[in-house]
Structure formats: C-alpha cells, structure tokens
Image: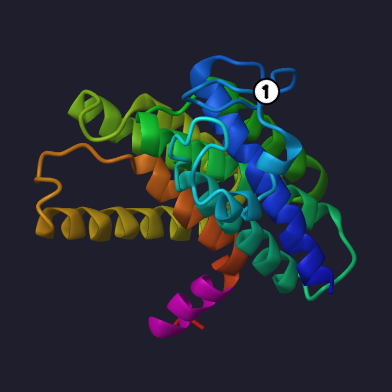
Amino acid sequence: MIIVIVAIFGLIIGSFLNAVIYRLHSGQSIVSDRSRCIYCHHELAAKDLIPIFSFIWLRGRCRYCQGSISWQYPIIELTTALSFALLAYNYNLQPINYNLFFALVFICFLIVIGVFDFKHFLILDKVVYPALLLGVVWQVFFGKILDGLLAALIIAGFFAVQYFISKGRWIGFGDVKFGLFLGMVFGVKLGLVMVLLGYFIGALTGLILIFLGKKHLGSKLPFGSFLSISGIIVLIWGERILNWYLGLIGIN
C-alpha cells in the first residue's frame, strides 16, 4: 500500500517537473504562472492536468485547440512514479526517513537536468547550483562530506580536463558543474560507478542512433542526460551494482 501511495505521489511530482522543465525554457514563473496550452495558450483546468489520465482521456490532444500534447508528459510522470516506488521499495517499506527524502529530491533534480539537456543541450546554473547545495547539506548532516568533496573534485576535474582539451566539443562546461553535484551526492565509489554507467549508456545510445542513420560519429549528444539516467539507476541500485562488479572481478 505504501508503494502505491509513493507511486501516486511520484505521478503528481512528475507532472510538476514537466511544468518546471517547460517554464525554465519559456521564462515563466515556476510558482505563480498557470499552466497553458503551448499552442493556443488557453489556461488549463484542473481536469486537464491529472497525471496520465488526462493525456489518455484527451487522446494526447489539447481540449481547446486539438494541438498535440508531447509524449514527454506521460513519460516523465511514469518515470518519476516508477523511480519513487523503486526507491521506496529499496528502503524496505520503512517509515520515511531523511535519506529517502533527499534521494527522492535528487531524483527530481536529475530528471529536470536530464530532460532539459536532452531538449536544449544545456544544463542551467539555476538548477544545478541548488542541487549541489542540497547535496552539500545532505552530506554534512547525514552522509560523509569528505567523501562527497573528494568525489566532486575527481568527477568535475575529469570532466573539466575533457572540456578544455576538446575546447567544448566533447562535453559542455555545464557537465563539469553537473559533475560537482553528482560527486557530492554519490561519493567516490558510487560516483565512479555512476560515471562509467553514464558513458556506457551514452556509447550504447550513440551506436544505436548511428546504426539507425539518425546520427554520425561527429554528432552531438546530451551527455548530461546519460549521466542523469545513470544517476537515477545508481540511486536505486547502486550498492547492488557495485557489489556485483566487485564480485565479478574477485574483490568481494
């Protein structure tokens, strides 16, 4: 029952994240502005904003102008709900605690950063810096701040070297700042797992797109999006992945 409640909460948060992603690009206020159709700009009623169900009921069309509603909306809502539910399940249905709360918020930041980078090839300071600050707060009070600081320097430094060597062709400077947040949150061990997984996801995606003729070897890809995906995976299954890998190479 708790998992179902968490999943429903995730659907609601996912709907909010969709609004955040859109308004960060449009310049609208995240708090005060009302949701509107991106085509006819008609203000949307509450019945138009029910996660998943409104999209299905309206058949992916605006009620007022019949403009097409992006599949991004139900995908993000479902992704958030599933991520929340899996994370809560990993906490063995224990009462809500601070670590779970912070992990859920980190997932929200990862989704916003990942989707925005996918759509606009940009990681915004106004998103990544608050995320980094929250990561510092979590490590100071509930984690290991020295481990977080070391990982932040290692990961951001690694990305910075790539950025300066390639003059921004391989990765953007936003990825360097994103690396600070990721390192702070995951620490050294899980941070390295997350980075390796991010590169694997990026390489696999690139190969598939090249095979399908959608991209070529010199095409630009949203690296921050791949890091966000790997970050969510590691938040949920990081320890299991690490233990599996250590066992594979005979360290465990």
Provide the residue designation for mark 1: 30
Vertical order, 224 against 75 (above or below)? above
Instruction: Classify residue 67 by image quadrant.
Output: top left
Residue that appears at 51% across and 37% down: 113
Q: In this view, does 131 lie to the left or right of 207?
A: right
Residue located 80% across and 49% down the image: 142
Residue 245 within the segment the image draws in magenta = yes
In the displayed orientation, state which residue is furthest to the right.
Answer: 95
Residue 149, can we see it? no
Residue 188 horizontal/vertical position (percent)? 53, 53
Q: Main secondary structure of the magenta part?
A: helix
Question: In the rendered image, which quarter contains the N terminus?
Answer: bottom right
- Above or below — where is 42 with respect to 7? above
Label 1 SS: loop
Which of the pair 121/45 is nearer the observer?
45
Percent across and percent down for residue 96 are 87, 60
Instruction: Say which residue appears at 37% left-offset and 58% top-offset.
Output: 196
Q: How many numbered marks, from 0 up? A: 1
- Judge from the rendering whether residue 122 lies leftward or rightward of residue 98; answer left or right: left
Relative placement, left or right, of 184 versus 224 is right
Depth order, front residue of 61/98: 61
Tell me the amino acid under the disc marked 1. Answer: Ile
Residue 148 x %, y %: 62, 44
Q: Indicate the quadrant where residue 218 lies.
A: top left
Q: Residues within 10 Å of mark 1 (few under 14, many from 20)?
A: some
**Frontmost residue, 91 versus 137:** 91
Residue 206 in the magenta stretch? The answer is: no
Report x, y in % for residue 177. Answer: 47, 29
Query: Which is more toward the observer, 138 or 229?
Result: 229
Residue at point 61% right, 65% down? Answer: 236
Vertical order, 13 against 64 (above or below): below
Q: What stretch is highlighted in magenta?
A: 240-249
